[in-house]
Image: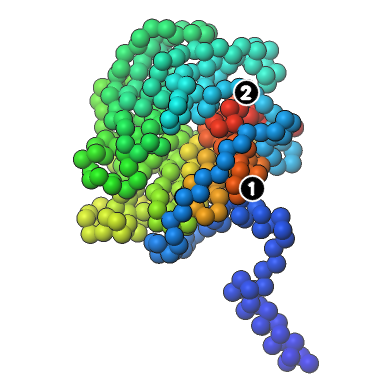
């Protein structure tokens, strides 16, 4: 009997290791279908990637249906989710000025509002009383920044600087274009983000690629797929890091001088390729695009073209799953949220179009310790997916407020959600 029991136990163990004995609930299967691949990993893990074209490249775009009355995204126990602002037109990005004013870039891939709206919570109750158009007639704005007496806007074709005084609710001056940026190309890489260093002596500009994978050659990609560094007046431009297909979110890891970015990786290699990621950005570092991905994995569409660059490709720090469209990035540098979230990173995942099962469409959290990732990504704000054919909204930018709450831009829903700890 002991021998038979041992044989049965060993057989069960082998089946479990092979994945044959997994018993998922209906809820778990639904979550897996909606969340996409679970092959998220930190750099300390071995990230097993399938071969290119293991699965077919699929176009799968769900209907963006909007939110039913009374329904909100879902946060973990102990958090409250409420509307901070609504009836916005593609509120893709948010910036909080030093005086606490909240600026929202309303912009989109095709029909864009091309404006920035100001929100001001006068009595600090978590609901802005003032909502006005701050700037308009822009060109697909995204990144915003206040430095000294200037308000900076990153349009798709350049960085503009406008005279600004804290408390103003409207800017009508023309401003100056201090950095010309390449526009056009792949229509989902029009976003340009801005971030200043601690003393305001440098500005970092994220510029996505013109195509999926240098489809028309590298001449079209000049000064693209990069993070650029400039002086506050636009002079002294240099490439800070390169080979980043579509870097959008940028932030500084708390307690460090290390720049991090969220990168939207390439398409059309199959369901599980290529993982989006967040990574610390090494000055002068090359991250693979278009010749390699997630380290020295050569892209078959650029095979043999630049073995020298493939060899120097850096491995990103944290994988976020393929086709999640990980765009937003903010480190939680406040204390309202429980200790596990403090100093960690929140990432807004806009959601897939090139995967047979939807992936992304949520905000995930990555724990950090001593300025480095310290665990795998975990779901934080979910409930954006109604079914494989329909989503309520699509999260993009994530912004930490001075009161410790967090704003999440839902661009297709026209809403900014506020997440606070009870």
Provide residue 357's location: percent of width, then percent of height: 55, 54
User: Could one spot residue 76 in this view of the protein?
Assistant: yes
Q: Nearer the viewer, residue 202 or 192?
A: 192
Position of the C terminus, as image quadrant, is: top right
Question: If you read the primary sequence from the N terminus, does the residue marked by circle 2 or circle 1 appear first?
Answer: 2
Say what secondary structure mark 1 lies in.
strand
Answer left or right for 368 relative to 160: right
Q: Nearer the viewer, residue 202 or 162?
A: 162
Q: Which label number is shown at residue 86?
A: 2
Provide residue 57's location: percent of width, then percent of height: 43, 56
Answer left or right for 291 relative to 111: left
Answer left or right for 312 relative to 165: left
Residue found at x 70% / y 18%: 125
Residue found at x 55% / y 44%: 62
Q: Which residue is mark 1?
A: 387
Provide residue 76's location: percent of width, then percent of height: 70, 42
* Cα–Cα span, label 2 and label 1: 23 Å
Q: Nearer the viewer, residue 260 or 218?
A: 218
Say what secondary structure mark 2 lies in.
loop
| Colour pattern | rainbow
Residue found at x 63% / y 73%: 20
């Amino acid at each position: 009997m002991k021998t038979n029991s041992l044989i049965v136990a060993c057989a069960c163990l082998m089946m479990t290791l092979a994945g044959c004995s997994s018993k998922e609930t209906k809820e778990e299967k639904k979550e897996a279908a909606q969340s996409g691949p679970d092959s998220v990993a930190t750099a300390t893990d071995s990230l097993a990637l399938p071969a290119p074209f293991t699965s077919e490249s699929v176009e799968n775009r769900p209907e963006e249906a909007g939110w039913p009355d009374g329904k909100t995204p879902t946060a973990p126990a102990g958090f409250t989710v409420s509307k901070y602002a609504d009836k916005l037109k593609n509120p893709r990005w948010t910036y909080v000025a030093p005086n606490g004013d909240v600026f929202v870039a309303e912009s989109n891939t095709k029909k864009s509002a091309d404006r920035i709206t100001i929100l001001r919570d006068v009595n600090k109750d978590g609901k802005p009383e003032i909502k006005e158009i701050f700037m308009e007639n822009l060109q697909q704005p995204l990144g915003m920044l206040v430095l000294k007496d200037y308000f900076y806007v990153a349009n798709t074709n350049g960085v503009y600087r406008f005279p600004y005084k804290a408390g103003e609710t409207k800017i009508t001056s023309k401003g100056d274009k201090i950095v010309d940026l390449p526009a056009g190309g792949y229509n989902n890489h029009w976003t340009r983000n801005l971030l200043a260093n601690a003393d305001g002596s440098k500005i970092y500009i994220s510029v996505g690629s013109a195509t999926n994978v240098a489809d028309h050659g590298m001449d079209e990609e000049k000064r693209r797929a990069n993070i650029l560094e400039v002086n506050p007046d636009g002079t002294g431009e240099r490439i800070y890091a390169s080979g980043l297909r579509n870097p959008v979110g940028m932030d500084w890891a708390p307690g460090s001088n290390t720049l991090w970015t969220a990168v939207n990786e390439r398409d059309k290699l199959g369901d599980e390729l290529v993982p989006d990621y967040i990574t610390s950005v090494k000055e002068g570092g090359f991250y693979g695009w278009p010749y390699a991905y997630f380290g020295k994995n050569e892209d078959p569409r650029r095979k043999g073209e630049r073995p020298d660059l493939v060899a120097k490709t850096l491995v990103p720090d944290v994988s976020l799953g393929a086709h999640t469209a990980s765009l937003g990035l903010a480190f939680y540098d406040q204390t309202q949220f429980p200790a596990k979230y403090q100093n960690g990173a929140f990432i807004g995942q806009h959601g897939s179009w090139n995967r047979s099962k939807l992936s992304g469409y949520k905000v995930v959290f990555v724990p950090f310790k001593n300025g480095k990732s310290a665990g795998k990504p975990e779901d934080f704000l979910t409930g954006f997916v109604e079914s494989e054919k329909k989503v309520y909204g699509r999260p993009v930018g994530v912004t930490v407020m001075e009161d410790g709450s967090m704003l999440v831009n839902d661009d297709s829903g026209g809403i900014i959600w506020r997440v606070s700890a009870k």
